[in-house]
Image (spheres, grey):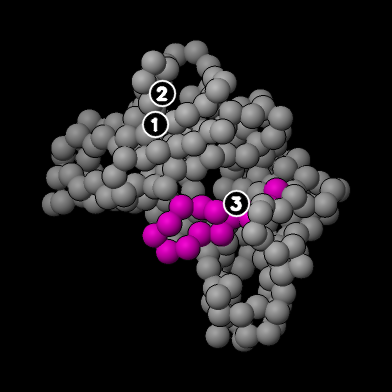
């Protein structure tokens, strides 16, 4: 069965510092991997996704993630944090092409310190 | 493109009443729609998956008679919370998939339900 683990329910960084949100997955088949962001009282917005091809994926708002098959990881990074990045971030995996269900991580709340 | 709307964005109702939440795909045809429930400070919990014209598939532990889902067209799905009680208060989020090969879901902005 597929599963997604996000290390750290809360991550706190200073404005301008590197953001690193960790995501590890388990899947018996090559997965599709997603990062979503949720601002307070809002739905989810897709940040980026990995499907096939280049393992370094660039998304919106300066975020990027690298798919590392050997480490079964898909960590999200941003070189310089901005106050507006404060939100909840969810990693998700889809490994069954027969349906469109996503397996969700528990989420990581990103806190930006001024 | 790929915009999903939900209506209402928030609703307050009395215990025992029913509430209907609409989820619409505005610029694409959604062959599959999903309904999630999110508790405070928690991840999304999938409630059910619906395909247009078919009965919804409910996740284990979700009462199908309590949470009625109708996916009547390729652009509209509704979730009706019947005989709502305070414990049904939550944030309900829908998502839609156009059936593309990458299983991407597009999310609505969510509906905050408060049952008094």
Overall secondary structure of the magenta section: strand
Name the residue located 58 percent from the left edge and 72 percent from the top edge.
B88
Residue B82 pos. (x, y %):
72, 74
Q: Label 3 lies in what chain?
A: B
How packed mark 1 is, by other alpha carbons closer than 10 Å (few <14, some 14-19, many 20 or more), is many
Location of mark 3 (residue): B46
Residue occupied by mark 1: A24
CB under 8 Å between discs 2 and 1:
yes
Q: Label 2 crowding class (10 Å Cα cut-off): few <14, some 14-19, many 20+?
A: some
Query: In the picture provided, is A78 more to the left or to the right than A44?
Result: left
Q: Residues within 10 Å of mark 3 (few under 14, many from 20)?
A: many
Looking at the picture, how far across and down is residue B57, in whole percent? 75, 50
Quarter of image, res B1 = top right
Residue A58 vertical position relative to residue B108 in the rendered view, above or below: above
Please report contact status of discs 2 and 3: CB closer than 8 Å, yes or no: no
Q: Nearer the viewer, residue A98 or A76?
A: A98
- Residue B77 percent across, percent down from the top left: 74, 55
List the single residue furthest toward the top. Answer: A53
Given the image, what chain letter belongs to the residue carrying mark 2? A
Any part of residue B60 in sight: yes
Residue located at (51% from left, 59% from top): B38
Q: Which residues are magenta?
A: B35-49
Same chain under badges 2 and 3? The reply is no
Q: Report which residue position mark 2 lands on.
A: A72
Q: Is residue B37 magenta?
A: yes
The chain carrying label 1 is A
The Cα–Cα distance between marks 1 and 3, rounded to whole angstroms, is 20 Å
| SS for callout 2 | loop
Residue at 76 percent of width and 67 percent of height: B65
In depth, the one of B45 and B102 nearer the eye is B45
Give the mark, 2 or 1, whose residue is nearer the N terminus: 1
């Amino acid at each position: 069965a597929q599963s997604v683990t996000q290390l750290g329910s809360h991550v706190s960084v200073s404005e301008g510092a590197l953001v690193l949100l960790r995501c590890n997955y388990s899947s018996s088949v090559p997965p599709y991997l997603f990062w979503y962001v949720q601002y307070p009282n809002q739905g989810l917005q897709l940040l980026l996704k990995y499907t096939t091809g280049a393992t370094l994926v660039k998304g919106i708002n300066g975020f990027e993630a690298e798919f590392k098959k050997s480490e079964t990881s898909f960590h999200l990074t941003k070189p310089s944090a901005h106050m507006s990045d404060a939100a909840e971030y969810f990693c998700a995996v889809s490994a069954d092409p027969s349906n469109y269900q996503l397996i969700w991580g528990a989420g990581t709340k990103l806190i930006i310190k001024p | 493109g790929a915009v999903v709307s939900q209506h209402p964005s928030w609703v307050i109702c009395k215990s025992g009443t029913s509430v209907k939440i609409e989820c619409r795909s505005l610029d694409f045809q959604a062959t599959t729609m999903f309904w999630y429930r999110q508790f405070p400070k928690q991840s999304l919990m999938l409630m059910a998956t619906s395909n247009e014209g078919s009965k919804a598939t409910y996740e284990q532990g979700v009462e199908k008679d309590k949470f009625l889902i109708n996916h009547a067209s390729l652009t509209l799905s509704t979730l009706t919370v019947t005989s709502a009680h305070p414990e049904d208060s939550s944030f309900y989020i829908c998502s839609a998939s156009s059936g593309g090969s990458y299983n991407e879901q597009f999310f609505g902005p969510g509906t905050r339900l408060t049952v008094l």
